[in-house]
Image: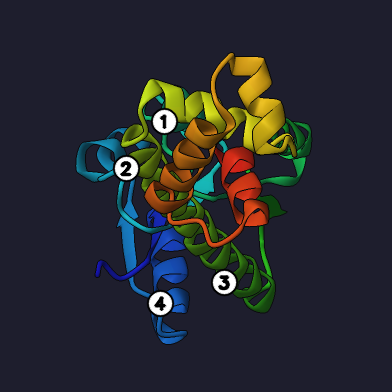
């Protein structure tokens, strides 16, 4: 399993180096980059971790990099922005775009480490949720069109006889389909099936 990494992107060599040393001293794997372009050239969107990103950089700004990650790469890596005091309004805009946090320079080491640890936890949780959703979609794909119809009715709380009436078929047939749905979706109860359907947007 790939170890979560703190990706640091900042065009100030000295500051970037001090951040990298701070994270390494805390036992966190670090990969640092002097520009957004350098980061994008090496970055794997599937790599776990978080991004500590300078807001104001030449060429491609931090906000622009955030948009590329979200809109073009569909990457939800947690982002912590570092800003100068004059850039606070831009930091607020970054939060509205989905950043996890923004901190003003100079930042207290403990505050930054706390934010990074929170970001890594958030990334792990999101990845777990995405894995669960991917598995549910795979299970759902095994259902026949009729079984999907039955599932859609079951999760609304309908009984087999009500579903049979709505679909114009025998109650016995619905019970068979219902059993198949529970089996294929690996659901141990209707309540579990309802939660699955909610995650799938059914």
- Numbered mark located on residue 117 in the image: 3
Residue sitting at x 71%, y 38%: 159
Task: Identify the mark nearer the N-term, 3 or 4.
Answer: 4
Q: Foreground residue, 193 or 183? A: 183
Measure how far apart labels 3 and 2 are at the Cα level: 19 Å
Q: Is residue 21 above or below residue 49?
A: below
Q: Foreground residue, 31 or 10? A: 31
Label 2 environment density (alpha carbons within 10 Å; few <14, some 14–19, many ≥20): some
Measure how far apart labels 2 and 4 are at the Cα level: 19 Å
Provide the residue designation for mark 2: 45
Measure how far apart labels 1 and 4 are at the Cα level: 25 Å
Task: Identify the mark nearer the N-term, 2 or 4.
Answer: 4
- Numbered mark located on residue 74 in the image: 1
Give the left or right position of residue 194, taking residue 147 as reference.
right
Q: Mark 3 and mark 4 in contact? Answer it, CB < 8 Å.
A: no
How far across and down, in percent of the image, does residue 61 sit? 49, 29
Query: Which colour assignment does the render follow?
Result: rainbow
Provide the residue designation for mark 4: 28
Measure how far apart labels 1 and 3 are at the Cα level: 23 Å
Q: Is residue 201 above or below residue 34?
A: above
Residue sitting at x 51%, y 53%: 129
Confirm whether residue 94 shows in the render.
no
Give the left or right position of residue 142, taking residue 77 as reference.
left
């Amino acid at each position: 399993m790939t170890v979560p990494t703190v990706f640091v992107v900042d065009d100030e060599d000295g500051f970037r180096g001090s951040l990298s040393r701070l994270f390494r001293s805390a036992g966190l794997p670090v990969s640092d980059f002097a520009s957004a372009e350098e980061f994008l050239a090496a970055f794997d969107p599937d790599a776990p971790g978080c991004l500590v990103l300078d807001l104001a950089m030449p060429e491609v700004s931090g906000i622009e990099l955030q948009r590329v990650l979200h809109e073009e790469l569909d990457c939800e890596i947690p982002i912590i922005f570092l800003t100068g005091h004059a850039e606070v309004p831009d930091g607020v805009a970054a939060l509205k775009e989905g950043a996890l946090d923004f901190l003003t320079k100079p930042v207290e080491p403990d505050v930054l480490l706390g934010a990074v640890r929170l970001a890594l936890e958030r990334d792990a949780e999101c990845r777990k949720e995405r894995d669960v959703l991917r598995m549910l979609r795979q299970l759902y794909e095994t259902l026949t069109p009729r079984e999907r119809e039955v599932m859609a009715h079951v999760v609304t709380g309908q009984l087999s006889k009500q579903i049979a009436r709505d679909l114009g078929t025998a109650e016995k047939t619905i019970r068979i389909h219902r059993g198949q749905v529970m089996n294929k979706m690996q659901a141990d109860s209707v309540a579990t099936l309802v939660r699955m359907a909610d995650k799938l947007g059914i």
